[in-house]
Amino acid sequence: MTIKEIMYFDRPDKKNADELVKFAVKRMDEMGIKNVVVAWSSGYTVRKFLETIGPDRKDLNIVAGTNPSPHSISRGRQLIIIRPNDSPEAKKWKEEMLAKGITEISDTISDEVKAELESKGVKVSYLNDDLYLGEPLALGKEQDSRRARLAPFGLASWIRPLDIHAGGDLSIFTTISQGFRVCVGCTVVAVKNGFIPEGMMVLALAGRCTAIIVRAGSKPKTTIIKEILGFERGSSHFERDPEHPDGN
């Protein structure tokens, strides 16, 4: 039997990464893990991880898992939509953006940032959303229309591009945290994109902020969780939007 520490965060906040990344890097080194997947949305966690390990860690295979490429049909952009359960801070920020006429933001890695990361030895793994289904909590008219046309063929309302690219339903992982779902999904996509060999032990970080140790697989059911290092409470799809169909 082994007893280990887990970090719990009371609410989603990108600043959680300040503490969790240090904790995760320590555990990574204790286990001799050389493969790392870090999800990129704002880029905060990736930059915090690179800052923590320093510039001389050439022994690591680091993959930044991000949204669709800026050259894809969805351009890796998210619509700014005010939702009933937004925090006061999020609502205020969205209102300010919309007042300026800004209706969408980039949620992926640009060509310039990709070049910067690759110069540091970081591989960039883009998610595929060629069906242009978008994220269920921030759908545009075209995305909503596509989903409606595919619904008779079995497309569930909660299906996200990450589920499709990973090849399996990841929604159950949000009962732990949103980051848990992304950790598993981005690891699978990194394997499928050829950045991590199947079967390798991986440190995966995502959300605000979740960190787990997994055995990498090319599909969710063969991506085996070995350790949970930490996660944020209150980030699940259901907690963010209890009225969403299926509570997902």
Image (cartoon, helix red, strand yellow):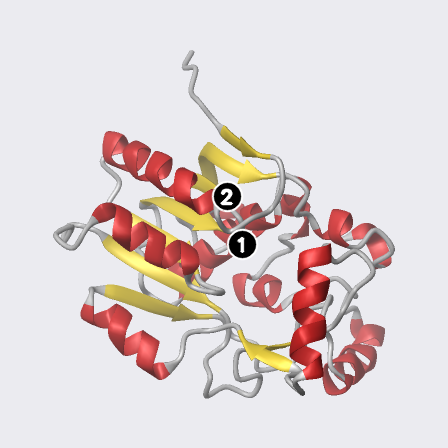
The answer to which quarter of the image holds residue 55 is: bottom left
Image point 83% across, 51% down: which residue? 242
Image point 41% across, 47% down: which residue? 204
* Residue on which disc 2 sits: 210
Q: Is residue 103 above or below residue 163?
A: below
- Cα distance between the residues tagged 1 and 2: 9 Å
Query: Which numbered marker is on residue 182?
Result: 1
Task: Please name the amino acid that badge 2 sits on.
Answer: Thr
Q: Tell me the quarter of the image containing the N terminus.
A: top left
Residue 102 position within the rendered picture, expressed as x and y whole percent measured from the top left: 64, 84
Query: Which numbered marker is on residue 199?
Result: none
> Would residue 216 be found to the left or right of residue 197 on screen?
right
Around disc 1, counting alpha carbons within 10 Å, would you say few (fewer than 14), some (14 to 19), or many (20 or more)?
Answer: many
Residue 18 position within the rendered picture, expressed as x and y whole percent measured from the top left: 40, 44
Image point 34% across, 58% down: which residue? 47
Task: Please name the amino acid that badge 1 sits on.
Answer: Val
Q: Which residue is most to the top?
A: 1
Foreground of the two, 212 or 41: 41
Foreground of the two, 39 or 152: 39
Residue 183 position within the rendered picture, expressed as x and y whole percent measured from the top left: 49, 50
